[in-house]
Amino acid sequence: MKKILAIFILLSTGISQAQSSIPSNYFKNPLDIDLVLAGYFGELRSNHFHSGFDIKTQQRQGINVIAAGDGYISRINISNYGYGKALYIQHPNGYTTVYGHLKKFSPEIEAYIKKLQYAKESYEIEVFPEAKDLALNQGDLIAYSGNTGGSGGPHLHFEIRDGQQRPMNPALFGIDIKDTQAPIINSLYVYPLGEEAQVNGSAQRQRLKLTPLNDGSFKAEEIDACGEIGFGISTFDRQDGAPNQNGIYKIETKLNGDKVFEIKMDKFSFAETRHINQLIDYEYYSSNNSRITKLYRGSNNPLSIYEEVVNNGTLDIKDSLDYMFNISVADFKGNIKMIRIPIKGKQSHIKNPKNIKKTDYFVQANEAFSTENGPIDVYIPKSSLYEDTYLDIEFKGDTIYLDEDNIPIQNYITIGFDVSKYNAEDQDKMFIAKLNKRGRPTYSSTKKKANRFTTGVRNFGTYTLASDKNAPSIYPVNFKDGQWISSNKDISLKISDDLSGINSFRATVNGKWILMEYEYKNNTITHDFSDDVVTETENILKVIVTDNVGNSKTYEATFFRK
Ligand SMILES: [Zn+2]
């Protein structure tokens, strides 16, 4: 395993990576089963673009995950959320591959990280091993696939990143996914954008009717339009072997045969990923839970996925002229779905003007904004919003209605509460909560300092003060107090908290810290006896769980093993 180390050191000096020379046969399938995708690169997700391939694992866990290329483990990250248990391999060619939601690492890596978890006394851990620690060859077993972290079902999340840690489309490297079907179009929308712009006598977003043609393409209903307009599309791609609705690779538009706009999912950076909320129609998404990709680009939009853009992708439609607008949606294999949209330039009276709500709170995107009322204050830093926006804000006692979550926020805004009217004991149990649609409070990470609570948020909505006086609860799952459990492979407990949520837990046996793996999706913590730290016959287990305001609960039980 370590023989490639010398070669690696030789190669790792002076490597430069030209975009034009993406190695096409360097990496291989990270699983020893056929590649079937549950998610594509660049797919539209909540506040981010999907940064890799989600590879299906036959609805089960425990499939062998192998190194896609030679290299060494350069990072191990174990997190309750996100990628769960994740491995990063640094390759001698300068790229990094990432493997997420793993169930378990290979024995060598497992031993390496457990030692560090025991030293740190923490399940969550992040380490950056050196090249000499865990070197490996292409095809070596590195882990078993799982469902850890923010995963909705067993799969492997696989990424390839460049030297600047920018995720790239694995298909560019020859990771081959069978795909014989063209993308599918759900719906098409037109947006009058300019001040005087209109479509069919309206200045509002409109859905256009699509008629399928014999050649597999669509024709949209002809529209009358005038002024600056843009289009939006709801679309997905389906690869072979699975029904999953995955992201598309490329969208291109043409006006009267000339290219206007192109989006291509080759590469992006994590710094720009939240700007996805500028690519989609966020207002539509917040009310319909479905995403329209806008085929034009707003003014403060730094996304790098736009390949070619003329007039930001918008069209300037003149009275008395005819236009043909074409949209083509393509997958990586070049299967294409086309839409043709005939446009007649026609100035007419606007019957449905734009709905612009005007309020007392006008926030300019490129200036900071603050306001306060009673015990509550709000600070919106410059560039938190993408556009100048009228906000609907209402204050009522300890509650602020801070508009609705249909306006995207890029950078954290701060909400502060003066809590001096509460005594110290009450303050101890209090936190800032966001009220969900049904009025239920959810914990918003709260900083407390001298009669003042603050929270940073990236969603509009209703925020208030809430109080949590109840400690978390802890129940044993596969044992009882006083029981002999010699044949148990592990010991597990359910932990939960009714309001502010679990902040931390700590488990010991006979006073010694034991590693318990936390799975938030089923509220379970589990200790694996193969760690060999439980060696006595009589064992006193003690578990302490603390919630986000500091209420804690202690559970104690005795078990026996031989
Ligand atoms: Zn994924």
Image (spheres, helix red, strand yellow):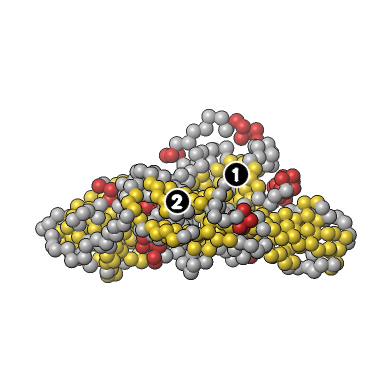
Can I make out residue 66 in this image? Answer: no
Q: Secondary structure at mark 2?
A: strand
Q: Earlier in the sequence, mark 2 or mark 1?
A: 1
Q: Residue at x 54, y 52 (%)?
A: 420
Give the x, y percent position of residue 360. Answer: 32, 55
Q: Which residue is mark 1?
A: 89
Mark 1 residue's CB less than 8 Å from ligand 1: no
Q: Quadrant of residue 462?
A: bottom left
Q: Left or right of 179: which side holds 431?
A: right
Give whichever of 302, 440 is nearer the camera: 440
Mark 2 residue's CB less than 8 Å from ligand 1: no
Give the x, y percent position of residue 31. Answer: 59, 55
Give the amino acid at mark 2: Asp
Q: Residue at x 42, y 65 (%)?
A: 289
Q: Left or right of 459: which side holds 544?
A: right
Give the amino acid at mark 1: Ile
Q: Secondary structure at mark 1?
A: strand
Marking on residue 377: 2
Give the x, y percent position of residue 64. Answer: 64, 56
Mark 2 and mark 1 residues within 8 Å of each other at the beta carbon: no
Marking on residue 432: none
> What separation in Å lies between label 2 and label 1 (alpha carbons)?
46 Å
Q: Residue at x 60, y 30 (%)?
A: 10
Give the x, y percent position of residue 228. Answer: 21, 53
Q: Left or right of 36: which side holds 505?
A: right
Give whichever of 177, 195 is nearer the camera: 195
Q: Say above or below: 113 vs 35.
A: above
Q: Residue at x 53, y 59 (%)?
A: 465
